[in-house]
Amino acid sequence: MMSIASLRSAAQSNSVQIFYPLSTVRCAGPVLFRDQLARDIACLLDIDDDILSWSCRSLSLSHGGQIYKPDFLVKRADLSFVVDGIREEAAPEWVREKAIAAGYPYELIDASVLPSVRLKNAKDLLRYARYEAALSDRVRLLAALDEFTSMTVSEALIVFRETKPMAGLASMVLQRFVTMDLDERLIGPETIVRRKRD
């Protein structure tokens, strides 16, 4: 596994920008963020329970010799759709029509509408995306939630014995074993953790 320093060095030598956090959970294919706005949208896609997977700039749309790749092709259980960030340099006018013709609804997202608390919580959780809770810790937490229905983050952290507690809990949120409210306030010791139910 490359260190962050070597990743940064490789990116600089290849004129590729790095956007944080580095890790993703549901990205299918290479990570090719256009800018920080795209990275922020991807953070929100990763913690959206309705999203099965997403890919970066994987769909090529063409018109009159021009080629454009929207930021994301997003897959839900019921449909796939295209997402693009709104920038000063707008996508060509024909993009929406071509995306719809290809069978993909087209959605534009402006940075101003991104939910700030949810985005910060997503970024905090994604710092732990490469971790995986040990089986014993996972079973222990799920059993405790079956017994008590819910726990605070501070109570849930005590359950972890093999995995670093915050890393283990964050990974279980990202892997959809447990849920917590990511919209009202920043994750803290009093945040409620519940078992994810389908």
Image: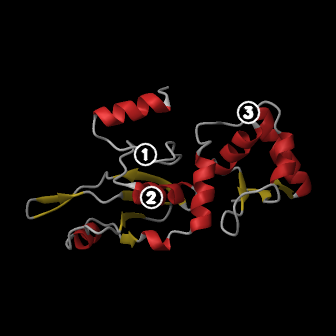
For the point 35% across and 47% down, which residue is it? 32
Disc number at residue 79? none
Q: Which residue is mark 3?
A: 134
Disc 3 from disc 2: Cα separation? 29 Å
Tag 2: amino acid: Lys
Tag 3: amino acid: Ala
Which is nearer the N-term, disc 1 or disc 2?
1
**Residue 133 can be seen, yes or no:** yes
**Residue 49 can be seen, yes or no:** no
76 over 96 or under it: above or below: above
Is 86 placed left or right of 76 in the picture? left
Q: Which residue is mark 1?
A: 28
Helix, strand or loop status at disc 2: strand
Contact between labelled residues 2 and 1, with CB atoms less than 8 Å apart = yes
Residue 151: image x %, image y %? 85, 55
Quarter of the rendering occupied by the C terminus:
bottom right
